Structure formats: structure tokens, C-alpha cells
Image (cartoon, rainbow, N blue to C red):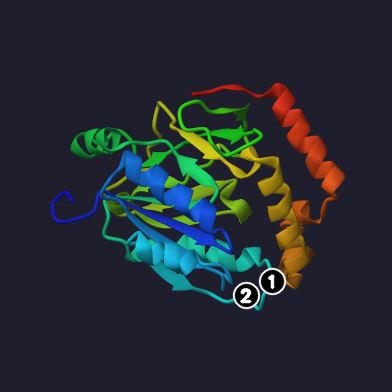
Amino acid sequence: MIEDKPLLEVFTTSWNERNTILELINFYRSLVPDCLIHVQDNMSTDDTEEVCKENNVKFTSFDTDNKMDEGVLIKLRNNSWKNSNAHYVIVCDSDELVEVNKEELLSNLNDIKWTVAKCKGVELFGNDKQFKDAKYGVFSEGYSKKVLWLRKAIKESILSPGSHTANFIPNEGFQIIYNENPPFLYHTKWMDYEYGINRQKQIKEKGISKESKSKGWNFHYSLSEQKHFDYWQKGMKNRKKVR
């Protein structure tokens, strides 16, 4: 707590991702121990809610009529953080991890050099999810998102589907200033092929909302297992140690 405010609050969405949520909790709390985490859950049938309760994580639910609905997710990402009184917010998917620590956030708070952080996207590839010390992946412009910002500086976020592009409207007295040294933003779905392909199958079976289909959102969930295997195999071939 800094000036009676949490230093960081993380907002993420989930659907039947208890293990991924647990990894997210452990990751962010290892870097910013007193951070708040808010899981916005799409009617999971696994024990995601219990995991959140056990780890003192705020848990709220939203309903998309059992469909993958990117339109609803966009609204959540652009609005849920507005009630936060934390100094910084991160708005990310549950398989996205921003490597920023408490000391870096405090330093910028004491001498503001950026109000919105550009992140350097890294898509991780592997055969298991046990990368505790070393991380192997491919740098990705598509995952180089802007998902971390100084809360008091920002009035509105305008995040696109998947947050792949982002614009911001500052509060009075602030400007949009980007950081010079982007932190890594890890995308973890393909750290384990079995997890990644099963996740694709789950969402494919769940189905995509009419709006998402009509606007071409979430199309990758309709790809064949062979396409996904080829993608993972290419990542394994090109991956390098990034940390």
C-alpha cells in the first residue's frame, strides 16, 4: 500500500482456466506482493472461484449465454478498471503475464516518466509449463500490447479486440507518455502443447457469438488441430531463450 492505495491491480477474464489463473496469481504476486487481482469469470464450471477465494482474489461473474463473445470482453477490458483506486492497473487475458516489478513501478510513481507502458510481446513455446527460471519463446508484435498504465493519468482506454491495438484519453493535467524500456509480456498458452490444443477445442465446442462471427473475431478458434500443431511446431523450431 502506497498512500493508502494498492500499488497495482490486475484485471483478467477467465473461463474454466483454474490452473492458468493460479499461475497468474503466483506470477504477479511474486513481482508485486501486495497487488490486487480481480478475476472476471464467464460462468466457469471448474473450481476457478474456489482458487480465487483461497488466494484472496476478487471474483465476479458475467454471462455470455455460453458463447465466446469478444464484444462483451472488449467492454469489460475498457471499463472494469475504472473503479480501481490502485496507482497502476494491468488489463490482460489470463494467459498474459507482464514482467514488471514493484521497484520499477515505485520509481516511476516518484518521478513519472511514462503513463502508459508499451510491452514487448513474447509467445512462449514448450512441452510443459515448468519454466520457473528460463523462458523460451518468439518475440511477437501481435502480443506487444499496451495493457499497463498509471491509473490517475487515464480517463478512457480504447482497446481493440484482443487488445492488440490501444488508444487512451488522458485525465486533465496528464499526457499519454510511453515508456522507453518495454517490459516483457509473456503469452503462455503454447508453453504446453496439450494445454494449448485442449484450450482451442474447449472454446471451439463452446461456440462463438453471432457478433464475433459477423465481425471476424476469434476466428483462430475455428482452425483445425493440424493448423494449431503446425503453429506450435513452428514456434518450437524458432524459439530462443528470452529470460
Q: Which one is nearer the viewer's eye here, 46 or 156?
A: 46
- Horizontally, is 147 left or right of 109 in the view? right
- Horizontally, is 16 left or right of 113 in the view? right
Residue 237 lies in what quarter of the image? top right
Q: Which disc is residue 212 wearing?
A: none
Disc 2 crowd rating (10 Å Cα; few below 14, some 14-19, many 20+) is some
Disc 1 crowd rating (10 Å Cα; few below 14, some 14-19, many 20+) is some
Q: Which one is nearer the viewer's eye here, 241 or 90?
A: 241
Residue 225, percent across and down? Answer: 83, 48
Q: Amino acid at mark 2?
A: Thr
- Horizontally, is 57 left or right of 186 in the view? left
Q: Amino acid at mark 1?
A: Lys
Q: Is residue 126 above or below residue 38?
A: above
Q: Visible in this render: residue 206?
A: yes
Q: Is residue 38 above or below residue 99?
A: below
- Horizontally, is 148 left or right of 199 in the view? left
Q: Helix, strand or loop at disc 2?
A: loop
Tell me the residue that label 1 is attached to.
Answer: 67
Tell me the residue that label 2 is attached to.
Answer: 64
